[in-house]
């Protein structure tokens, strides 16, 4: 029997995470894999939950000092960074204890909430960490993350984040504009896209033992998108080095696009001529495309994108085109049209 494993976020958040679903999933745990088919699972979240329960997703972190503890981060002296007043928000910042325990990071499992991702991700060593800069650049090189962070102008920006699952948050990221790293990388004029790749380490990231996902996680931007001032590389959050579950030590934030474009824990940045194919596009290209710009009027094939739930306040609010950043980014898409831009 073939059981297709779907990522839970193929379901809208409202359908994927109510406590009742979570509880009934737990109640069924003992029954094992055979039950997957027996209960006629159409919900991907359910299947993913079972796989986690079978030890494929992520067990509780052992107690003891976590190698990923941001309190020991070698760049902690750089925080808090200067706040950039050009990036403020009209909505309340999501409390850290909420955003830090509600994460999509499939390398560490598929249970978005209930502290699981945070606990398991904490086992990931943050150093040594290098970033390979390669492809169409003057000179390919591999740079230590601390050398990158210390060479960049760190600042704090308040950004909205809109997941394709229809939840959102408002976060004080610390980091630097992607365009600064592009300048540092010295791409050739033949480079048309920036491709970003997450680490690959199934020993600490049990989710990467699921062969049905085409690891490592990849996504990308056009050069014009990457050099737009809004495109941001995140190194910290809430005024300190980012805890691992947010994608330490280097994570993208492109707030006008759905959250899956914002690649976490980057180890490789490649300048390429061809449009990169992201992990989710590879799995389900009809639903998760390259552009993935936020648009309330273009529904996901299986749910509406008209509104979103703010995980901080619990409020449901209307979704705004380009997640409210149209003034900064709409010109990137001038002359282009069609639904493809928005999914
Ligand atoms: N490597 C990697 N990056 C990733 C993901 C992931 O599973 N793996 N999930 C994406 C999705 S779907 C979202 S919504 C955001 C979630 O970021 P947060 O956990 O900091 O809220 O990370 C994105 N980046
Ligand atoms: Mo997401």
Image (cartoon, rainbow, N blue to C red):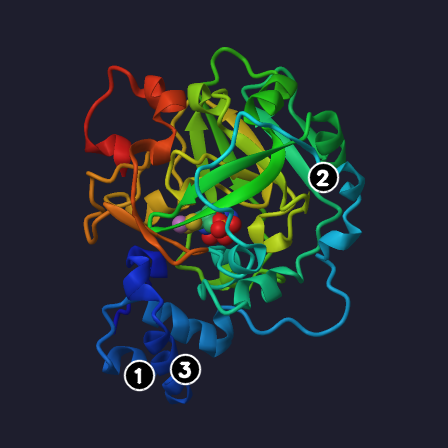
Residue 177 left/right relative to 29 = right
Q: Label 1 neighbourhood size at 10 Å, few (<14), some (14-19), many (20+)?
A: some
Badge 3 is on which residue? 26
The quadrant in which the C terminus is found is top left
Residue at image position (30%, 78%) is 36
At x 66%, y 57%, the residue is 124
- Tag 1 near tag 3, CB within 8 Å: no
Circle 3 SS class: helix
The residue wearing badge 2 is 80
Q: Distance between the residues labelled 2 and 1?
A: 49 Å
Is 26 located above or below residue 302 in the figure? below
Does the numbered disc 2 mark a residue whose Cβ is under 8 Å from ligand 1? Answer: no
Q: Earlier in the sequence, mark 1 or mark 3?
A: 3
- Residue 33 seen in the figure: no
Can the viewer see residue 257? yes
Judging by the rendered image, the residue that carries numbered circle 1 is 35
Report the side of 215 relative to 12 (left or right): right
| The quarter of the displayed image where residue 82 is located | top right
Q: x%, y% of residue 112?
A: 45, 62
Q: Do the residues labelled 2 and 1 touch (CB within 8 Å)?
A: no
Identity of the residue drawn at 60% across and 28% down: 84
N-terminal of the pair, mark 3 or mark 2, is: 3
Residue 236 image point, x, y percent: 64, 42
Viewer-side residue, 275 vs 48: 48
Packing grade of label 2 (10 A; few <14, some 14-19, many >=20) is some
């Amino acid at each position: 029997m073939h059981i297709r494993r779907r990522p839970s976020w193929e379901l809208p958040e409202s359908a994927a995470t109510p406590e009742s679903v979570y509880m009934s999933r737990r109640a069924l745990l003992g029954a094992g894999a055979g039950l997957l088919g027996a209960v006629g699972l159409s919900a991907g979240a359910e299947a993913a939950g079972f796989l986690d329960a079978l030890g494929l997703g992520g067990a509780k972190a052992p107690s003891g000092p976590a190698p990923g503890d941001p309190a020991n981060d070698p760049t902690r002296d750089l925080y808090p960074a200067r706040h950039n007043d050009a990036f403020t928000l009209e909505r309340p910042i999501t409390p850290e204890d909420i955003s830090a325990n509600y994460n999509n990071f499939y390398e560490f499992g598929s249970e978005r909430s209930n502290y699981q991702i945070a606990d398991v991700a904490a086992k990931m060593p943050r150093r040594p960490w290098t970033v390979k800069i390669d492809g169409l650049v003057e000179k390919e090189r591999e740079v230590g993350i601390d050398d990158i962070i210390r060479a960049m102008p760190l600042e704090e920006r308040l950004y909205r984040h809109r997941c394709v699952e229809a939840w959102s948050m408002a976060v004080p990221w610390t980091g630097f504009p992607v365009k600064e790293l592009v300048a540092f990388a010295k791409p050739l004029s033949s480079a048309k896209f920036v491709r970003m790749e997450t680490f690959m380490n199934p020993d600490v990231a049990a989710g990467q033992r699921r062969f049905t996902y085409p690891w490592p996680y990849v996504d990308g931007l056009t050069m014009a998108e990457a050099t737009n001032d809004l495109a941001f590389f995140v190194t910290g959050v809430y005024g300190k080095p980012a805890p691992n579950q947010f994608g330490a030590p280097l994570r993208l934030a492109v707030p006008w696009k759905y959250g899956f474009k914002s690649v976490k824990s980057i180890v490789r940045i490649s300048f390429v001529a061809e449009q990169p194919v992201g992990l989710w596009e590879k799995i389900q290209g009809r639903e998760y495309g390259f552009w993935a710009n936020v648009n309330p009027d273009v529904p996901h094939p299986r749910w509406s994108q008209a509104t979103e739930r703010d995980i901080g306040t619990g409020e449901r609010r209307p979704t705004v085109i380009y997640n409210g950043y149209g003034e900064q980014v709409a010109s990137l898409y001038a002359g282009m049209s069609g639904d493809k831009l928005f999914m």
